[in-house]
Amino acid sequence: MSRFFSRISTCMQTRHRSSAKTLFQPQTMAAVPLQKETKPGLYHAPPEVRGMISLDREAFAREITVPALRVPTRVLNKVVKSLKKATIKRPGVARVVQEGEPCSSDGGDFRLVLLDPLRMSSPSSFTEEEAEALRSLDVPEELQNHEMRLTYDNLKTEEVLEAVLPQGQEITSGFSRIGHIVHMNLRDHQLPFKNLIGQVIMDKNPGVTCVVNKTNIIDSTYRNFKMEVLAGEEDMVTKVKENGVTYEFDFSRVYWNSRLSTEHMRVVDQTKPGDIVLDVFAGVGPFAIPAARAGATVLANDLNPESHRWLKHNVKLNKVEKSVRTFNLDGRAFIQGPVRQELPALLKGKANIHVVMNLPALALEFLDAFRGLLNKELSCDTNLPIVHCYGFSKDDDPQKDVEVRASSSLGFCLEGRSSVQFVRNVAPNKEMMCVRFTVPKEVLFNTDDEQTDPIEEPASKRQKCGETSH
Ligand SMILES: C[S@@+](CC[C@H](N)C(=O)[O-])C[C@H]1O[C@@H](n2cnc3c(N)ncnc32)[C@H](O)[C@@H]1O
């Protein structure tokens, strides 16, 4: 069968018409493949939207021409099925449309199957399989032009923003979704467009009713951001599901990071039913609650009264009240208070004791709270607490760096006694790491002369740590 196609390359140009119309004119010219460089431009918004500050959705509409295949309705379903990969895929665009003008010359009932213009430049773009299917259904491989109105609804977020924001600059820096809230971290050049960006994100993400931008870096004690609402209603109490567990909290007043879900699971997976989990910086419960659901007994603490309030709420929400006790203390006071009280009994038991310390900016420093925590009379070699402590590192060797800092804080060299896990890259050249080790009995139990450890000073101890262990 001959493969003919109309001059799609010229038809790709914008046509300013007010209504969609099929150009029903199958042509019998030699196939003219699309110029590669014209393809990406097809789904561009009109140039006039560049620099738009307040969103005018109508201004994005334009006429475009896409290839179409004329198909008798009796085989329509079969054709659509066979051409799954060749049909147009655009938000809000139907793959099958009525013909623009009734065509009675052949008396049949036909529809147009719209094809993906980025893939289909001529009939020869059909794969052998597709061409064979069309032949078996007696559908000529003749493409025609279909003019359609491309609107704001048919454009993707990047396409809208690319058309509006200054050319050559980064479009968005990505965002995270926390229930109905989208959280962005806009760059300076995006700020004049912040409300438009917020509105577009809301339009294009069903279920999102509030878009916020971080207005300062995360530096407050409680690790939460100051934020500004860009679009939608200011309703910061949200609900999320992570690893099958539901959490509710006020996103503007507590710490939540969806990017930690794998890490939460990684640590929780290390606990067994009956184990003990001591969560020093618990937030709203993403380690504590799944651990309790997995059968652990948990003591969970957070200094932020709002985090503590939502932690208690989530404990109830997930029906683990019997397994979780919550505290609203400074981490050091938690270790030297409730943890110190509970440990003697726990050490005698068989259950593993996990201490989770996720406050990466500071947690390594809090490890000194374990120094001489218990009386030497209680000393035992088994069942000592296993610590999972987080730290940021900008060092070339982040593994070594956090191990050395943990050692300094404990006053005991952990070389050969710890494992360090990379968690995630938080910024260029800044990693979040997790060091896991068993608290040495030399650290945990008080001796008359306090510590016999090889390390006293926190600074530049890497060398010393290495030297003393050999
Ligand atoms: C990085 S967040 C981690 C929260 C939770 N564990 C998670 O993985 O999402 C650190 C938490 O430590 C709390 N925090 C900050 N300083 C603290 C301190 N000195 N003592 C106890 N909690 C503290 C913050 O309120 C915050 O909820």
Image (spheres, helix red, strand yellow):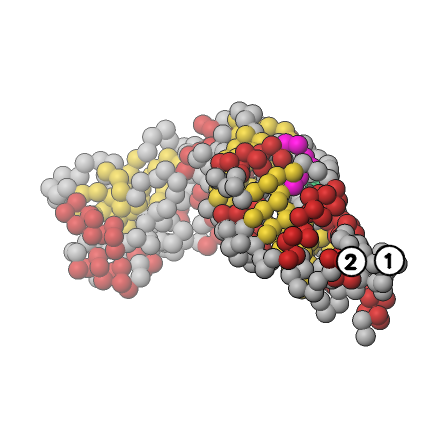
What is the x, y in percent for residue 13? 42, 42
Q: Nearer the viewer, residue 122 or 72?
A: 72
| Amino acid type at mark 2 | Lys
| Residue at mark 1 | 448
Q: Is residue 170 left or right of residue 443?
A: left
| Amino acid type at mark 1 | Asp
Note whether 371 is above or below 468 in the view shown.
Answer: above
Give yes or no for contact between labels 1 and 2 (Cβ–Cβ under 8 Å). yes
Q: Does the segment drawn in magenta span residue 305?
A: yes
Q: Does the segment drawn in magenta span residue 137?
A: no
| Residue at mark 2 | 376
User: Please, what secondary structure does the residue beneath circle 2 have?
Assistant: helix
What is the x, y in percent for residue 92? 36, 38
**Magenta region:** 301-307
What is the x, y in percent for residue 396? 75, 62
Q: Is residue 136 left or right of residue 249?
A: left
